[in-house]
Amino acid sequence: MTHDLQPALDALRGARAEATATLTDLIRIPSVGGTAAESEIVHHVADRLRAEGVELDLWPIPVAELAARPGFPGMEVAREEAWGLVARLPGDGGPSLMFNGHLDVVPPGDPATWTVDPWSGEVRDGHAYGRGACDMKGGFVSALSAFLALHRTGTRPRGDLLLAAVVGEEDGGLGTYATLARGWRADACVITEPTALDVLAANGGALTFRLRVPGLAAHACARTSGVSAVEKFQLIFPVLRALEASRNRAVDPMMRRWDIAYPLEIGTVRSGDWASTVPDLLIAEGRFGVALDEPVDAARAEFEATVAAACAADPWLKEHPVVVEWWGGQFASGRCPSGTDLVERVVTTHASLSSTTPAVVGAPYGSDLRLLTAAGIPAVQYGPGVGYGHCPDERVGLSQVHACAETLLHLATTDAAAR
């Protein structure tokens, strides 16, 4: 094994066309959470690594067993199976480093809103297009490329280098949770989520909730003898908007770049079962932003108290209060601890390879960062692309995919982990 970085760097740069082809192949696997393709893509990556002679741990995740644990981060889709995958490159005894990336994606939505096939992986104008290109198969390919360049050239990283390919990130964090439960640990972790190559060192949380708003059914021709659940929800929605505003009046400096640091939104509303019947139930589901360092229980308590106060102000809801349920993904907030030099090393490594210095910021969405930091593993997000995840014509710039890979390669060979 060698400590000379140049062979690995040359190999990485010489494999850019291969990296682009790999990204196209991954985009073409429609790995929507909970589908068979979510497992297929893990095996696809495992086969690729096995062919390279890489040390692998590929295991079936005991989904039901993990879901029954008190600290399980939640799921929003049904899964018959799921797989975990960690590849390991032995290091030289220094601090270990993990690259973490999720391979599951959200559904593509209406294909008519796309100008390309969402599963094509089409490359044009320096970008790879398709669902998951940005969030986050592009970043995973960056990590995979750096890992393989080191492996192929026999370049020894400073410490053990792990590549964790996870699933279920989009709806809670099953894959990273399972990886930790499996016993995998590192001294630091870089999650290659899309950040436009800035360094994201903190995440707000996001709790999925359900509201059951009761009404009283009646024939629509005599609607005043009933109570419309739709009308009662109209009393709740503005109260939630006011709660969001109050929680965003003063935010952590890491979050000030965002218009709304801790968003609260209703995503689905369902009510009624007949056009000429006063609806007796409305079900609304949404996500509730958790502030940095705010305990999840405290956030839930404030939300529930706000809903209860709104109900107490209305005669019907006072006697028939809205029921709040917490389900699906339960993303706590997370922050890379101040006692690590990981943030500084990612920033300085990127800056040494580029004409720009990355910003260090927080983000208003949940991620697996909070699972890793809660397990005592300093973690940041740093990866290619931004702004196109979950959108029509999702895409990632190939130049950023390649630049990210070079940064990761240097991090792995220059003692990037926490001290």
Image (cartoon, rainbow, N blue to C red):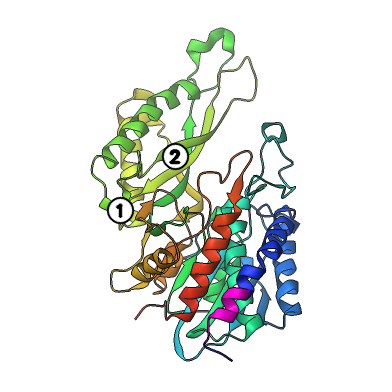
Residue under the point 59% across and 50% down: 396
Q: Is residue 314 left or right of residue 45?
A: left
Residue situated in front as seen by the camera: 156 or 306: 156
**From mark 2 to mark 1, how far is it between C-alphas?**
34 Å
Q: Is residue 199 magenta?
A: no
Q: Report crowding for label 2: few under 14, some 14 to 19, many 20 or more residues within 10 A (C-alpha).
A: some
Q: Which residues are magenta?
A: 4-10
- Does 8 lie within the magenta span? yes
Pick the front one: 238 or 106: 106
Front-most of 91 and 319?
A: 91
The residue nearer to you, when weighing 371 against 236, is 371
Q: Say which element carries label 2.
A: strand
Checking the image for residue 323, the label placed there is 2
Residue 98 position within the rendered picture, expressed as x and y whole percent measured from the top left: 51, 74
Disc number at residue 254? 1
Residue 183 visible in rendering: no
Q: Decide which of tag 2 and tag 1 comes sooner along the chain.
A: 1
Task: Locate residue 342 relative to residue 44 in the image: left or right.
Answer: left
> Eyeballing the image, is 292 above or below 69?
above
Q: From this viewpoint, which residue is outermost toward the top?
A: 221
